[in-house]
Amino acid sequence: MAGKNTYKQDERLDEPFDIRHLLLASAYIKTYIPQMGLALFLSILGGALGLAAPMITQKAIDDALIPHDMKMLITLAVLLVSVYAVSILFTTIRSRMMVKVSQRIIYDIRKDLFAHLQKLSFQYYDDRPHGKILIRVVNYVNSVSDMLSNGLINIILETINLVIIVIYMLLVDVQMSLVVMCGVPILAVFMLWMKNRQRKAWQAVSNKSSNLNAYLQENIVGARITQIFARENENAEIFAGLSEDCRKTWMKAVQCNNLMWPGIDAISVLIRAAIFIFGIMVFSSGAKSIGTIIAISGYSARFWQPIMNMGNIFNNFLNNMAYLERIFETMGEKVTVADAENATEMPPIKGHVEFKNVSFSYEEGKEVLHNVSFEVQPGESIALVGPTGAGKSTIVNLLSRFYNVGSGEVLIDGQDISKVTLHSLRSQMGIMMQDSFIFSGTIKDNIKYGKLDATDEEIREASRRVCAEAFILKMPDGYDTEVKERGSLLSQGQKQLISFARTLLSSPAILVLDEATSSIDVQTEKALQQGLNTMLKGRTSFIVAHRLSTIRNCDKIMYIDDGGITEVGNHEELMKKKGAYYRLYTAQIEEIA
C-alpha cells in the first residue's frame, strides 16, 4: 500500500480558468433548452407578479389606508394575496421542472464520462489511484449538475428580476432609486477581489478530497492486507492526516465564502439607511409621501436580494468550477490506444505472430524491451520465462495492444495490429491475467462474460474442461451462486478456474495465459493440465510462467532478460545449452526436492 506522500500529491492550482470547460458543459445544456426556457418564462412571470407587491402596498397606504377607503383597501389586499399565490405556484412548477433537468444532466455527463474511461489505456490507470477516478464520476458530477441547470436559470432570472426591480423603482421615484443604485460600483470591486481567492480555495478542497477518497478506496480493497501486517494504527494516522488536510482546506474555502454575503449585506444595510435618511429629509418638506418611502425601502431590500443571490450563485459557480475542471480534464484525457483513422476489421485470425524490432518503455528513458524480434507459426505454443520485471507480461500486453509500441511493429497474419480495430482484434483473443478479476453477480454471469449468448450447456462444458465444475456444483446455488464483489466468496484458485472457463468459452484464436495457474494447487494443476492441452491445441498461445514444470511441453520457450530474448528453444534444447533457462529450471527442481 502506498505511503502518505503518495496521497498528498495535489494537482496544480495555478492554472488559469479554461473557458473550454464551460463550452463543453454547454453541450449538455443545449438538449434541455426548451424545458429550461419554459422554466425561465414561468420564473419571470412569477417574479414580475411578486415584484408588484411594493407598488400595491404604496397604493394601499397612500390611496386607501390614509383616506380610509375600505373598499379599495380590501380590493388591493385581495390583489396582493392573489399575486403572491400565483407567484408561488409558478415558482413550484419551475422547481420541479429544473429538478428533472438537473438529474438528466447528471445522467448524461456520468454516462459519457464512464464511456470515456472505458476507452482509456492501461497507462492511464497505472498512473492514478482508482479512488481519484471514482470521486470524479460520482461526487463531482453530482456537485456540478445543479450549477449547469438551476445555476444558469437563476443567474438569468436574477438579472431579469434586477432589471424589473429597477424599472419599478424608477416608476415610483427616480431620485430615491439613484440612491439605492449608488452602491453597485462598490459591490463590483468587492466581487472581483474575491473571485481568484475563492477559486483557488475550492480547487484546494477538490484536491484534498480526491486524495482522501483515493486512500480510503485503497484501504477498503486492501483491508485484509492491512490486518495481516497489523497496519491499522499507521493507516489510521495517515488517514487522520489526510482528513485534517481536508478539514483545513474546507475551512479556508468556507471563510472565503463567508466574506461574500456579509459584504453584500453590509452594502445593502448602508444603502437602506441612506434611503431613510434621505427620505426623512425630503419628507419633512412634503416632496415625498410616506408610501413612496416605504415602497422604495421595500424595493431596496428586493434590489439587493437578487444581487445577494447572484453572489451566492457566483460562490457556487466558483466552488463547482474546480469540480467541472476535473471532470472535463478526465473527459479530455487523450485515448492513447485507439483505432487508427483508417483502421480495418481484423479478418479471422490464423495465428501467425511476428514482432519486428519492437521497443517499449513505461517511463521515458527506461526501456523495458529493446529491438525485440521473433516469429511464431500458427498453432505454436510459446512460453515466456525469465526474472521478474524482465518484460514477459509486456510482450503479451503489446500483442493484445493494451499499450502502443514505442517503435517497431507487431504483426498478426501479416497485419500490423495498430491498423486494425481494437474490437476485431481483442474479440479473437483470449487473455487471462495473473489477477483473475471476478465481477459481482453469479458464477454463470462471470463465465459467460466474454460470450453473452452462450448456452447453459456450453458454460458447463467449458467448466468441466478446466476442472471448475466440481467445486461449482458444491456451491449453495451451483452456477447461480452470487459471488459478491470481486468474488469474495471464492478462493484465489477458484477465481482462476472460473477465469479459465471464461477464457475457454470465448473460443479465442490466440490464447494468452499470464501466470494463469499461479494460485492453483499442484494437484488441481495436474488435473487441469489435460484441459489446458485441449485449450492450447490448434491455437497460437503465449504462456507466461514462473512454475516451469507447466511449460515443458511448449513448442518454444523464450528466456526474456535485459530487455530482449536471450535464449530460444524447446525444453530439451535449452537444457542441453546449460544456460540461463537450465539454471532457472534446475534451481526450481532443487527447491521442490
Image (cartoon, helix red, strand yellow):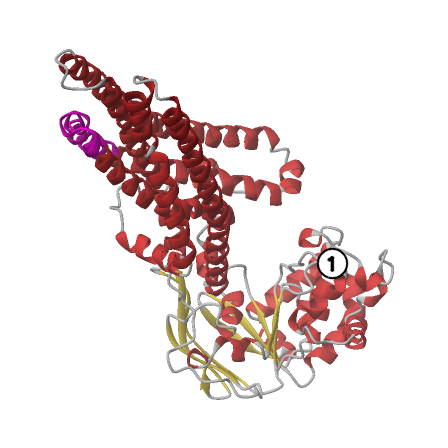
Q: Which kind of residue does numbered mark 1 sit on?
A: Gly
Residue 203 in sight here:
no
Q: In this view, does 322 lie to the left or right of 576?
A: left
Is 494 drawn above or below residue 289 in the view shown?
Answer: below
Q: How crowded is mark 1: few (under 14 residues within 10 Å), some or many (20 or more)?
A: some
Front residue of 67/153: it is 67
At x 72%, y 59%, the residue is 495
Residue 587 picture quarter: bottom right
Position of residue 114 relative to residue 426, above or below, is above
* Chain part drawn in magenta: 169-194
The residue wearing badge 1 is 493
Toward the viewer: 343 or 174? 174
Left or right: residue 372 versus residue 453 is: left
Residue, x 32% and y 43% (percent of image)?
A: 155
**Where is residue 473 drawn, in percent x and y?**
86, 63
**Residue 210 point in image, percent of width and height:** 45, 41
Mark 1 secondary-structure assignment:
helix
Residue displayed at 41% across by 36% down: 83
Q: Nearer the viewer, residue 99 or 359?
A: 99
